């Protein structure tokens, strides 16, 4: 039976990931679970070292590489000891050349396959997809990375959060680095702006993982109505010239909410295989992707039902469509289609009909959550 993986995720060094991992190890040990420290790096921090006291530690393996000695986790020794739970710090760590695996996350995979539960840690700057973003924010490039999918596949991810002010106070008090190193760190990597940005990135990444779990849960339990854990806006595109306006409007609306995001959908008729897609659709797809969204193409004879089905599938909280501008739009998004969207959206999805330069009228309709109906609102 495969072991389970729990990962403590933190925005920066010193927030308490290793301490939290050791505290969980102590808790499990007190309850009678067989826990060992497979590898923990305390960086000389007294409180972290104190938290490790009393837990069995598997001796490390010392290797020579290019004239230097390195201390690594002894994977074979841990496998031979076969504990119920192994504490393995620094998920993104790169092993020295003589180790069996290149990366520590590969060592952890062997432990999991052997049926050993693993608790590990990772900093957000080591996530592969965020490496460049963190470098841009802090000016420091992290050379050790772990693929996002490795962390996302964990059975549990816990965010270890600490405000920028509290972390800087820890540094100033010498709880993270020695005094001379802490002073330099406070002026550079640990500036308040840097820490605030890293903290927000960590929260958003963790929220995405939670959102994925909720989608899986809703699917497994056949839950149709969206759960508004975050704002997610779905913009419906006809492929006409108003599309870019709608896409930008959707992006702005999503950006107003913390962690909000947007997607787009184009519904083509059932017989569309014999037709060419609208000429502007490729350009609109590129704009959606440039702004961080994704465009879904759906074939259906019922535009409203196709849009609603996708909205429920992706847990959308709002649907945005353009006001009628031409025969084509009247056919795709006629008043009947708008009414069908409103009637089918229930109490959990807002339906917004927005005006644009090509619209036949100059109004904005919005159906509010809570059954307050659709009403005319002046364009701001």
Image (spheres, rainbow, N blue to C red):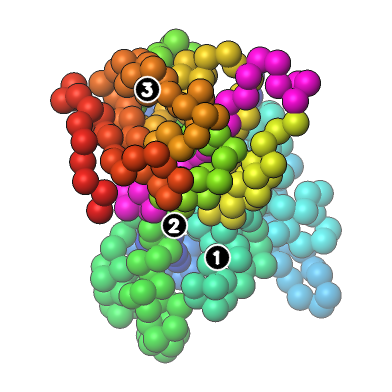
Badge 2 local density, few (<14 within 10 Å), some, or many (20+)?
some
Image quarter hosting the N terminus: top right
Residue at 31% across, 15% down: 343
Tell me, for residue 335, which label it has, or none: 3
Quarter of the rendering containing residue 210 = top left
The answer to whether residue 236 of the structure is visible from this angle is yes
Mark 3 or 1, nearer chain start: 1
Does the magenta run of residues contain 167? no
Question: Relative to 143, does residue 114 appear above or below in the rendering?
Answer: above
Residue at label 2? 201
Does the magenta run of residues contain 264? yes
Question: Relative to 150, does residue 132 appear above or below in the rendering?
Answer: below
Residue at 43% across, 87% down: 184
Q: How many marks?
A: 3
- Foreground residue, 187 or 318? 318
Asked whether the residues under the numbered discs 3 and 2 touch, taking CB atoms below 8 Å apart as contact, a structural biologist would say no
Residue at 67% across, 67% down: 143
For residue 233, side relative to residue 130 (left or right): left
Q: CA distance from mark 3 to mark 1?
A: 44 Å
Horizontal and vertical percent position of residue 153: 58, 35
- Foreground residue, 180 or 130? 130
Residue at label 1? 133
Residue at 83% across, 75% down: 66
Which residues are the magenta region?
252-275
For residue 369, side relative to residue 4 (left or right): left
Mark 1 or 2, nearer chain start: 1
Quarter of the rendering containing residue 169 = bottom left
Horizontal and vertical percent position of residue 67: 82, 77
Badge 1 local density, few (<14 within 10 Å), some, or many (20+)?
some
Mark 2 falls on what kind of element?
helix
């Amino acid at each position: 039976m495969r072991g389970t993986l729990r990962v403590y995720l933190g925005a920066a060094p010193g927030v308490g990931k290793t301490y939290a991992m050791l505290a969980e190890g102590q808790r499990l040990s007190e309850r009678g679970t067989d826990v060992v420290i497979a590898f923990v790096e305390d960086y000389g921090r007294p409180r972290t070292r104190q938290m490790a006291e009393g837990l069995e530690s598997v001796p490390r393996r010392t290797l020579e590489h290019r004239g230097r000695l390195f201390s690594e986790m002894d994977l074979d020794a841990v496998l031979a000891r076969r504990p119920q739970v192994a504490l393995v710090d620094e998920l993104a760590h790169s092993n020295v050349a003589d180790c069996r695996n290149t990366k520590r996350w590969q060592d952890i995979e062997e432990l999991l396959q052997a049926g050993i539960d693993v608790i590990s840690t990772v900093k957000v700057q080591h996530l592969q997809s965020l490496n460049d973003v963190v470098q841009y924010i802090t000016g420091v490039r992290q050379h050790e990375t772990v693929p996002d999918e490795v962390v996302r596949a964990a059975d549990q991810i816990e965010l270890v959060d600490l405000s920028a002010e509290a972390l800087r106070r820890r540094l100033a008090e010498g709880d993270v680095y020695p005094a001379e190193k802490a002073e330099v760190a406070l002026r550079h990597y640990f500036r308040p702006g840097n820490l605030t940005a890293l903290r927000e990135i960590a929260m958003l990444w963790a929220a995405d993982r939670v959102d994925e779990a909720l989608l899986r849960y809703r699917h497994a339990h056949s839950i149709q109505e969206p759960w508004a854990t975050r704002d997610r806006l779905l913009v419906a595109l006809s492929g006409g010239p108003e599309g870019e306006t709608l896409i930008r409007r959707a992006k702005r609306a999503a950006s107003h909410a913390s962690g909000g995001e947007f997607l787009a959908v184009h519904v083509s008729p059932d017989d569309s295989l014999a037709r060419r897609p609208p000429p502007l659709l490729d350009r609109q797809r590129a704009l959606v992707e440039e702004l961080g969204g994704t465009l879904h193409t759906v074939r259906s004879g019922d535009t409203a039902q196709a849009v609603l089905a996708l909205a429920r599938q992706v847990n959308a909280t709002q649907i945005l469509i353009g006001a009628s501008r031409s025969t084509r739009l009247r056919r795709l998004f006629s008043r009947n289609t708008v009414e069908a969207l409103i009637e089918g959206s229930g109490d959990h999805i807002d339906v917004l009909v927005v005006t644009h330069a090509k619209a036949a009228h100059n109004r904005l309709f919005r159906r509010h959550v809570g059954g307050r109906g659709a009403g005319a609102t002046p364009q701001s």
